[in-house]
Every structure is written in structure tokens, then in C-alpha cells.
Image (spheres, helix red, strand yellow):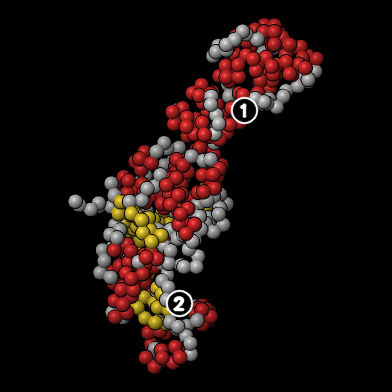
Amino acid sequence: MTSPSVIVRFAPSPTGYLHIGNARPALLNWLFALKAGGRFILRLDDTDRERSKEEFAEAILRDLNWLGILPHQFERQSLRTDSYDAVVTRLKASGRLYACYETADELDRKRKRQAARGLPPVYDRAGLKLSEADRAKLEAEGRKPHWRFKLDETVGHVTWDDLVRGPQTVDIGSLSDPVLIREDGTYLYTLPSVVDDADMGVTHIIRGDDHVTNTGVQLQLFEALGAPVPIFGHHNTLTTASGEGLSKRTGALSLGSLREAGYEPMAVNSLAVLIGTSVSVEPVVDLSTLAGLVDLSMVSKAPAKFDPADLDGLNAKLLHAKPFTEVADRLKALGVDGGEDFWSAVRGNLVLLKDAVEWWAVVTGPIAQHIAADADEAAFLASARDALPEGPFDGQSWKAWTDAVKAATGRKGRALFMPLRQVLTGLEHGPELAALLPLIGREQALARLDAALAA
């Protein structure tokens, strides 16, 4: 059995709840794999022992499942430390990983001195100049080393052809040797990520453009490990409508909150993927169709601004097009038993499916009672009552009734229709009454007219 030609990964840290901005890389990776017949790995970056929580890990799985993303493989970095330790041994032996002892304050002072001299804030590799005696003395003082990866500055520049941004270049001389291991011995993001990508055969890394600079470092690390270099694609990231970044630590627009609010997952998927691309943002019915629309070259290089109001519009369009068979069980779970006739009558007025509950209450009652405001309106409603057709009502009853009321009272247009709508529904807006009237029925219609006249 041959392995798939495309293997992608989504590697969130379980330190908070996923939000709409996290959905973008997850979906772009999933759709890329779906289109190519490839595999999708969910890999939890849970090496931060203090901030990583199991409740967040469970929420990630739940949120991805809601979006329709079903990983082919699930990994936890916290279970793979032996692999990272083995790579560290190799890098130390080759001289590519070296110990440094500066404190955060000392490094900050170095950067300020460099800035004052007009120099870039690049680490001066002081750790490489330490002798064994120097290191022993520092450790005797209680200092513990952090470990940096020695970049190969002789190459000058690192280049790659980005799936989104085209040819990219990073000047290695502008980068500090990155810290891969903290003083407490825990790993930062870079080393576990590259080791895992290499071990798991990841072929394409699709992620936000805030990682572009990291790519230069990671390409050198892949080469230092003798591993195949994946193809990279850096998409634009989502911001709020005002241009602020989204954060899972604030809970802003979390996928869980969108789910609980009642949004359709395909409305979220459509907006998260299509916003900030050359494709118009319209609701897409399923992920297979969405995959057919997605080409990473269509993604803009400018940030994509997310407006929750756009989500409302997409959600409404999706619901308006849904057949009754797709929502029947969900309506029943909401306590709505109106059947296909009810769905056909009200779906055009829904933003969220749960809005159907309000229209079911309009049909079944009780409703906010309309009161005849004056003698003229009372006379009009009395004429309407007398003209009410015999039941049972059907799709023609509303026209027959309003024609009769128009002939009896001389009213037309808004003056004719609005008082009847208010009496029948307690509202000034809503679905077509030609469809609602048969659902309300003659008995309730008559009772509502009587109540308005009696008030």
C-alpha cells in the first residue's frame, strides 16, 4: 500500500479554546488534504506543562468535529519527548546546539546597546566563546543554560517558493540563533515541531503568515537533521473588523461559543476559508464543495477582517436553502412539530435555526395580543372577522379573505394587511401570511380577532 502524496498537520496548543481565526488554518489544511486525497494529522503542541489543559484538548477535538474535520491521525507532543531528546543529542554532538547562560535582563541590555549603536538586535553568540571552565563557573553560581541552535550564516539567505506568497527570502544574518530549550529543560515550539514534521512525513505546512520568519530557521533545522523539507504556504490571518488580532485566551469568537449560539458549521467554514481570498464569500453547502473552490494561490497577502455580521448573513442563506429533511430531527429536538409546511413558511425569516421556536410560538400561541386602537380600527377588524372564510384553511385562504375584507372596507395595501398581521401574529413583520394562516388555523385566527375586539 502506497502512502498518500500529501500529508498535512494542524498543531494547536491546548492552552485555550479555538476561535474563528484558528479555524482558518485547520480548514485550509483539511481541505488541501481532502482535495488531494491526502492525510490530516492533528498534533497537540502540549509541551507547556503548566498552561496545557486536558479540557482544552477535549474542546479542540470537539470543535474540529463540529466543523467536519475528522483527523486521520492524532498525536500529542508531550508523549514524544524521547524523540526530541535523541535529536538534541545529535545536534549537540555536531556543534549545532550550544549552551548560553545570559539572563533575560542581560539579553535585554545587550539588545539596547546594539540598538544604541545602530546594530540589529541579533544574539552575539557569546555562548559559543565560553570555555569548559567558564561554563563550570557559571553553573557553580547556580545558572542553568538555555540552548540555542547555531544557524549556518554562510548560506547568506534561505529561500523557498511559498504556496501563497510566491518566492520568499530570509536573510539568515538578520536572525538570532533561536533558543530551542529553556533553562528548565522544556522545549520551545521549534524543535518538537520540526522533529514531528520529519518523523510523521509531513509534506506541506500550511499556516498563518505570522510564521514566515520562523520558516528560515526551520528550513535550516530540517537540513541539519537530514530530513526532507516540506512545502510551505503562509496564508493571511483573520483579524477583528477593527484590525485587532484574535486570541484564544480571551475567548473572542470561540468555536464553542459560535456552536452554542446556534450557527451552522458550514456558515463558519465558508467565512473562515473564503474571507480574504479572490473568491466571493458565499455559503457553501459542504466541505467537499468548499475544497473544490480552494486554491492557496487565491489567498490575499493582506489581513482578512472578520465581521460577525457577515456570519449572520451566511447562516441565514444556508438555512433558507435547506430542505425540511435536513432539519426535521433538529426542529423536533427544539420542540417544533410543524412539519414541512411550517418549515417552508418560516425558513426565509430565520437567521439561526433556533429562531424557528419563536415562529412556532406565533403559530401555536399564545402571542402578544394586539388591541384595536380606535373605533375605526375596531370596525375594520369586525368586518375582517365577519369575512373570515370557513375552514379548513389552505394556501388560497389568505387571498380569499383579504379580497373579501378589501371589498367590505375599501382598504388596501398596508392599511389592509398590517392590522391583520398584527392581530394574527402580534408582530409587524414575518413570513408570508398566505403560508402562516393555514398553520394558525381558523379557530385560533377567530380567537385572536375576538380578543382584539374585546380589549
Lateral position of residue 33 relative to residue 346, left or right: left
Residue where numbered disc 1 is placed: 361
User: Looking at the image, which residue is at 29% across and 72% down?
Assistant: 224
If the image is split into quadrants, where does the C terminus sit? top right
**Where residue 275 sits: x, y (%)?**
46, 45
User: Mark 2 falls on what kind of element?
Assistant: loop
Q: Residue at x 59, y 10 (%)?
A: 391
Residue density around tag 1, few if under 14, some if 14–19, many if 20 or more, within 10 Å: few
Q: Residue at 50% across / 55% down in the picture?
A: 17
From the viewer's side, name the closer residue of 226 and 65: 65
Q: Amino acid at mark 1?
A: Ala
Q: Which mark is residue 47?
A: none
Residue 328 location, x and y as percent?
47, 29
**Does the image show residue 200?**
yes
Which of the two residues, 234 or 20, is positioned nearer the viewer here? 20
Please, is residue 27 above or below residue 140 in the view?
above
Q: Quadrant of residue 9?
A: bottom left
Res 212 → quadrant: bottom left
Q: Point out the tag, 1 or 2, that comes first from the N-terminus.
A: 2
* In-image side of 281 versus 307 (left or right): left
Residue drawn 45% across the image and 40% down it: 266
Coordinates of residue 189 in the picture (x, y in percent): 41, 67
Q: Quadrant of residue 292?
A: top left
The residue that disc 2 covers is: 184
